[in-house]
Every structure is written in structure tokens, then in C-alpha cells.
Image (tube, rainbow, N blue to C red):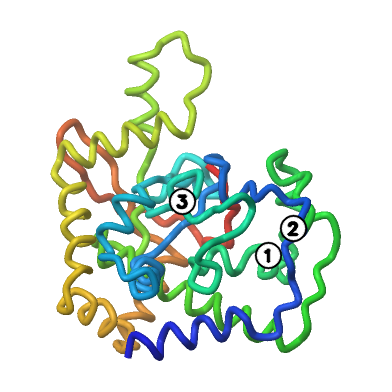
Amino acid sequence: MLESYFHYRTDLAKAHCLLQCPETCDAPGCWSSDIIVEVTAFDLIGLSQVLDMPVSSLFFNYCCVGIQGLEFNPRYKRLLLKLAKPCHFLHKTSCTVHDSKPLNCVLFPEYHQINNLLSTFTKHSIFSKVPCLQGDIIISSERRVALKKLRRIGRIEKAVSCYFLFGSPSFIIDSKPLHRELIKDHPKKRSISAREYERLVIKKLKGIGLYNLIMDSVVELDTHRGIESIFNTLDQDDFVTSLLEQVIKPETIYTFKEDRIKQLRRKLGPQAVTLMLF
């Protein structure tokens, strides 16, 4: 089952693709810590099959837990797994796991072009000189179909992965209490960086024991039972639909209260495709 599933993903990733990374590109998406490349449990499982490495080894060596601000309201941050930077699979300017790379890597920048997002990307300095973003990319109608299928697979994998690892398909954190705490510790600071938020969130997660639970879930993916459990979820159509609805229109957020975490009901509105930035 695993082999056929990932073969299908790889075939879609290659289907009718005319994009070639220019030699002049220095791969900022792979080395810049300002660019988030979110990975899922499924990305790690696929890489583990190709590299013959336990999922937990891949995670502990090449990934980390992080947060990303929501595009529609930066007050809220979403918990995720991401590639550590610079990406350990980057050799000079080439990807050493190209055929098995995470779906977010596969989709950029083609999927963002067909959603008219490239002009938004190029407003940010880190993307402004990326060669493949300087003009339209040739995307056939067949390629568009493949990209949309990949995006659908990616959305499902992300929701299921987050539910498996974090207990929620979209673990959204209210950063306002964190901001107050960071300002209290650094009263002369005018602004708080994304990395400071991230460090505090991870400290909080460790303090309440949730970080260890996430790590336990990662280690569980080294077992046949763990992989079978997460893949069986994909076949539960009604449950997957419910997870996707919670991602699109989240109604639960999490806030840290001293040494505990609290769930709050709050409608945040539909989420769109967001930039891969802190």
C-alpha cells in the first residue's frame, strides 16, 4: 500500500511538468530560515521509505516544530512541522531527494501561479530576485489538473498529520498572551520577532508536556502500527471531510495560561493559501 501510494504521488509530481530550476537560482527556499517549508507525517514516511531511515531519525535530524502566522490575522499562529534550515537535502543548489521531496516543495511555484499568488510573493525581498518568479511559468492544462490533485492530497495529508501529531487538524495559538509575556521580559523592545514567539511556544509546549506527546507520536511512526493507523485515517471519508472543514473554518484556538493550555471557541473565518513566511 505504501509503495503504490507514494508512487502515485511521485507520478503526479512529475506529470506534464515543464518547470526547470534555473542555474542562476541559489535555492533560497532551501536555505533561508525566513521561508517555511511545512512537512507532514506523510512526507516523512515517504522519505523514510526512500532513504531507509526511521521516521523519527528524519524528524530529529532534519525537521523541527515551528509556528507560522496566519495571513488573515497575524495575531494567530499555527503549529506545524517544518524543515530545518538550511535544508539538509540541499547539495549546492540541487535537491538530493528531488523525486521524494515534500509536497510543499513540489507545488512551489507552479500551484501558486495558477492561483495568481506570485505577484504577492515577489513583494517580499527574499523572493524578489528568485529567477522562476520573474515571469509566467508555462503550465499546460494537463499539468494544472495534476497540481490540483496534488494540492488536494496535500490538504488531506496536512489535516490528518496535524490531527495525528497535535490532536487538532489546525492547531492555532493566540499569540496575544505570548506577546505580553515577551514584552514584559524585554520592555524596551519595539517589536517581537517570529523566532522569539516560536522559542516561547516550544518552551510552553515542553512545560505542559505536550511537546513530549508530539515526539511520542513521531516515534510511533517508526512502527507498523503507527503507519497503519495514520494511513487508515485516509480511508475514513466522513472523518477526513470533518477535519478539512475544521482547517478551512477553524472554530477552536489554544491559549497558554501560565503552566497550562486552554481551548477557546472562536470563529476565525476561511483560511486561504498562505505565504511560506514567518
Residue at the spot x=33%, y=15% of the render? 185
Q: Which numbered disc flags the more N-terminal residue, 1 or 3?
A: 3
Residue ID for mark 3: 88
Residue type pointed to by label 1: His
Q: Residue furthest right?
A: 135
Q: Quadrant of the N terminus?
A: bottom left
Q: In this view, does 214 lie to the left or right of 63?
A: left
Which residue position is annotated with label 1? 112
Between label 2 and label 3, give the one nearer the viewer. Answer: 3
User: Local crowd at mark 3 within 10 Å, few (<14), some, or many (≥20)?
Assistant: some
104 relative to 124 in the view: left or right = left
Marks 3 and 1: in contact by CB < 8 Å?
Answer: no
Classify 15 as above or below 43.
below
Label whose residue precedes the other's in the sequence (2 or 3)? 3
Location of residue 53 in the rendering, given as x and y in whole percent from the top left corner: 29, 66
Look at discs 1 and 3 and give the one toward the viewer: 3
Q: Position of residue 206 (x, y in %)?
A: 19, 39
Looking at the image, tell me whether mark 2 or mark 1 is earlier in sequence order: 1
**Relative to 32, residue 87 above or below:** below
User: Looking at the rendered structure, which numbered label has been put on residue 118?
Assistant: 2
> In the rendering, at what x and y percent does residue 68 appear?
46, 47
Residues marked 2 and 1 touching at CB (< 8 Å):
yes
Which amino acid, mark 2? Answer: Leu
Label 2 sits on a secondary structure element that is: helix
